[in-house]
Image (cartoon, rainbow, N blue to C red):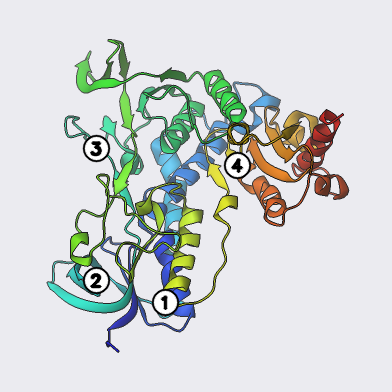
Amino acid sequence: MATYDYDMVVIGSGPGGQRAATQAAKLGKKVALAEYKACVGGVCINLGTIPSKTLREAALHLSGYRERNIYGASYTVKERITMSDLLHRCDHVVRAEIDVIQHQLKRNGIEVIPARAAFVDPHTIRMKSAEGQGSRNVTADKIVIASGTVTARDSHIAFDGQRIFTSDDILSLNELPKTLAVVGAGVIGIEYATIFAILGVRVTVIDKRPQLLSFVDQEIVDSLVYQMRQNRATLRLGEDVAAIEPFTENGQPRVRVILKSQKHIVADKALYSIGRVGATGWLDLDAAGVKADDRGRIKVDAHYRTTAENVYAVGDVIEFPSLASTSMEQGRIAACHAFAKAAKSCPEFFPYGIYAVPEISTVGKNEEELTVAGVPYEVGKARYKEISRGMILGDSSGLLKLLFHRETRKLLGVAIIGEGASELIHIGQAVLAFGGSIDYFIDTVFNYPTLAECYKTAAFDGINRLG
């Protein structure tokens, strides 16, 4: 048998890489993790998931948005909110998260190598020092690529990180704009558009697709659109962008977004959010026999193995759903498969969380999918305004929706929009996982007053629809 320096080398320290490395270490394997950035955690901790969700919480608190249904539309905790106010909370949370990850890696005996990794062959990786102190080769029996993604950029656009910027630049913004154009209405674009909107920024969202978030239940999306418009956001859907130009007006730097329909949208700043591409350009994938598409995304099988037998890929670099939670599970499954350890997962019941304002979360099937599949289903709904906890929280627009089979009453899907949606979804996820029926919610007693009562109310509503 060949002798290698490590049983496994993981490239990238984001959620998928962390979990793959930790799982392999817990199986008694010698593991190294390569990370070329100054801090572990990848985009998730340093630029993406954690900062954006912390920014959201800071915006909700300082703007007083959650309390406006009770105290009035003019209510605010801080009159003039600055980027410094928002980033103060982000800095604290990011530092704490990095410390937790470093401690976890150290506790599990995982060697962290500060280097940019590239393949020499399927079992050999060249580690180029992040500090410019040369390079060395290391060998490994198994390799996991968890290099993540970078923001897609158009070479014809003059990005400066302030006036025209991407989601990776938000933590470096000097000031809040009065007006903002968001180009791209994917998950990231919608999250930031709604965050800025509740801060009083006049937001215009532009996307060439005719509808938002096509993988989400359409009724939930309709509710999101309504609430975005209530916060004075403008949606320009079905519109292609021809150009984005910086210019100066009355001595003030501004941005002009020119649409192919000849509309012009003028704003203080523009967020360019048309997606992300796999961070694989420097990995020399061909040397390992690993294939990637034109957006740098790596193709994998059901066990997250690439076209090279000993090389796996997990996380955002393998495309949808590109969530931290799913990336972690992918890392665990990949490490278990690599070392022939049995592991079970239920990807059909992975929950999706969209941290817009309001929050959205779904699990299982939606109405559109069930209709296409010809499944006889019924719907049960509960609105937060019907639930005491919803009124206490001041969320009168929240909605929980249950989909279940008309004949067997088996639960098929759950969709929620409103406060705490990403937490509340896990009750439905558990029932889906054990194949439960809508009757479970009828027979279960929930704490009072809680948002969890929505499940019982929605279940009664659904059963009543059956006649």
Q: Are marks 1 and 3 in contact (CB under 8 Å)?
A: no
Say the numbered circle drawn on residue 153. Answer: 3
**First reached walking from the N terminus: tag 3 or tag 4:** 3
Say the numbered circle drawn on residue 122. Answer: 2
Task: Give the Cα separation between the discs numbered 4 and 1.
Answer: 35 Å
Q: Circle 1 sits on which residue?
A: 106
Task: Give the Cα separation between the discs numbered 2 and 1.
Answer: 27 Å
Residue at image position (75%, 46%) is 410
Nearer-the-camera pick, 324 or 45 = 324
> Which of labels 2 and 3 is toward the front?
2
Position of the N terminus by quadrant: bottom left
Task: Give the Cα separation between the discs numbered 4 and 2.
Answer: 38 Å
Residue at image position (53%, 19%) is 229
Q: Circle 4 sits on which residue?
A: 362
Q: Quadrant of residue 385?
A: top right
Q: Are marks 4 and 1 in contact (CB under 8 Å)?
A: no
Classify 10 Å Cα crowding around label 4: few (below 14), some (14-19), many (20 and above): many
